[in-house]
């Protein structure tokens, strides 16, 4: 059972609950800039880094790699005005990460005006469906732009896909025409609202119900799933604050009595699986396997909820047989299958550690909570 919870109080929150447990959380804030398309000015070129620093009107200049596969654009010069998109928001001492490979996001596709490539989401695995979507995408694009077909495109009618592509292309044309006369720096396209982005991402995955305390949200979400408007405090009803508090703790207890110890650091995140109070009644190998299998589901939930990214190393309890090790890797793959963020399980190292990577899409939960508190001081 997947519930989309939308709280519009003093501290707005959007949560995804799966079987009553908080699986992912978003904090809508004014000033969110990820996906925004901007007109910036090149302040400095760094040849050794093949990059430029660009004034985009923020406190810190944005970082722009100059060798991007899909753009075919020449190197800019210092002082040039450039159309860029924020790929990652400024974080800590680093300015925003920028790209000239613009992508405009719709419900069923991404349109990439600087490319002519047509691709299909890796979440769509059936060969026949992938081939059909590529052919449809090429017929729609006609070499005018590139497309990446999202999971929601899998069952969408061709007419609907063509209409969305045309809408996104016209959006790009407006940006392109506005740039020559726009002030530098300035915003050429505002990003989607957090709610729009969440609805776009989760609609193809399925939302069973939407619960909100805002009637305006109910209107916007009508037709996606049954909507319930509850005027009471949703954070209390669904125990959101207590779940967020637990998600900041280092130690996570498993229902069997085992624990996870989660240590994020600068280079990577390390997750240690421990037996703690867990004592199986059968032989040791069976006990270890059952605990590791249980840990897989909770690891996936904690990684999504805490929004951990980059390199993640998991120290499972040591298993003696290759069959058990493979069962745990398979369980981990299955547990992350519903993750909307690209996650790759790379396998076991020679020391028996699980290596995985998760694409960075947003700051980690702890940082987002701190940012929210700062905004409301």
Image: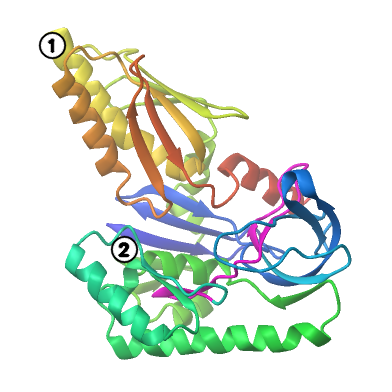
Q: Which residue is mark 1?
A: 281
Q: Earlier in the sequence, mark 1 or mark 2?
A: 2
Tell whether 361 sits left or right of 47.
left
Up the image or down, 95 lies above or below 8; here it is above
Count of numbered badges drawn on the protein: 2
Nearer the camera: disc 1 or disc 2: 2
Is 96 covered by the magenta stretch? yes
> Is residue 14 placed above or below 259 in the rendered structure?
below
Q: Which residues are magenta?
A: 86-112
Q: Tell which of 204 and 71 is nearer to you.
A: 71
Q: Residue furthest left?
A: 282
- Image point (34%, 16%), residue name: 350
Q: Which mark is residue 205?
A: 2
Q: CA distance from mark 1 to mark 2?
A: 39 Å
* Circle 1 crowding by C-alpha within 10 Å: few under 14, some 14–19, many from 20: few
The image shows residue 2 at horizontal and vertical percentages of 32, 58
* Element under disc 1: loop
Q: Position of residue 26 (x, y in %)?
A: 54, 56
Q: Is residue 323 left or right of residue 24?
A: left
Q: Residue at left 25%, top 22%?
A: 291
**Can see residue 223?**
no
Work out which quarter of the rendered image holds the N terminus and state it: bottom left
Please say whether residue 121 is one of the residues in the magenta stretch. Answer: no
State the mark number for residue 308.
Answer: none
Question: Residue at (19%, 62%) from the top-left corner?
Answer: 126
Tell me if residue 130 can be seen: yes
């Amino acid at each position: 059972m997947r519930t989309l919870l939308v709280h519009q109080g003093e501290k707005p929150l959007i949560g995804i609950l799966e079987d009553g447990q908080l699986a992912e959380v978003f904090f809508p804030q004014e000033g969110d800039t990820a996906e925004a398309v901007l007109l910036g000015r090149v302040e400095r070129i760094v040849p050794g880094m093949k990059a430029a620093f660009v004034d985009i009107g923020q406190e810190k200049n944005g970082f722009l790699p100059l060798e991007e596969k899909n753009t075919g654009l020449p190197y800019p010069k210092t002082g040039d005005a450039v159309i860029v998109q924020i790929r990652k928001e400024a974080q800590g001492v680093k300015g925003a990460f920028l790209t000239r490979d613009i992508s405009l996001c719709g419900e069923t596709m991404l349109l990439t005006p600087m490319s002519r490539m047509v691709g299909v989401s890796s979440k769509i695995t059936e060969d026949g469906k992938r081939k059909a979507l590529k052919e449809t995408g090429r017929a729609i694009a006609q070499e005018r732009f590139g497309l990446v077909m999202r999971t929601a495109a899998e069952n969408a009618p061709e007419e609907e896909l063509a209409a969305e592509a045309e809408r996104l292309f016209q959006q790009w044309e407006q940006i392109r025409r506005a740039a020559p006369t726009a002030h530098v720096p300035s915003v050429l396209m505002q990003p989607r609202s957090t709610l729009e982005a969440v609805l776009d991402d989760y609609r193809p995955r399925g939302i069973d119900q939407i619960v909100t305390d805002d009637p305006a949200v109910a209107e916007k979400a009508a037709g996606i799933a049954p909507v319930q408007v509850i005027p009471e405090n949703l954070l209390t009803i669904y125990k959101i604050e207590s779940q967020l508090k637990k998600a900041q703790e280092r130690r996570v207890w498993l229902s069997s009595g085992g624990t996870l110890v989660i240590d994020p650091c600068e280079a990577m995140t390390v997750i240690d699986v421990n037996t703690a109070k867990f004592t199986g009644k059968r032989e040791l190998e069976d006990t270890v396997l059952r605990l590791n299998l249980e840990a897989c589901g909770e690891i996936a939930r904690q990684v999504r909820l805490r929004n951990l990214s980059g390199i993640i190393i998991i120290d499972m309890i040591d298993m003696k047989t290759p069959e058990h090790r493979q069962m745990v890797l398979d369980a981990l793959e299955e547990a992350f299958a519903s993750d909307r963020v690209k996650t790759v399980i790379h396998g076991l190292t020679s020391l028996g550690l699980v290596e995985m990577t998760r694409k960075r899409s947003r700051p980690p939960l702890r940082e987002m909570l701190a940012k929210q508190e700062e905004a409301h001081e």
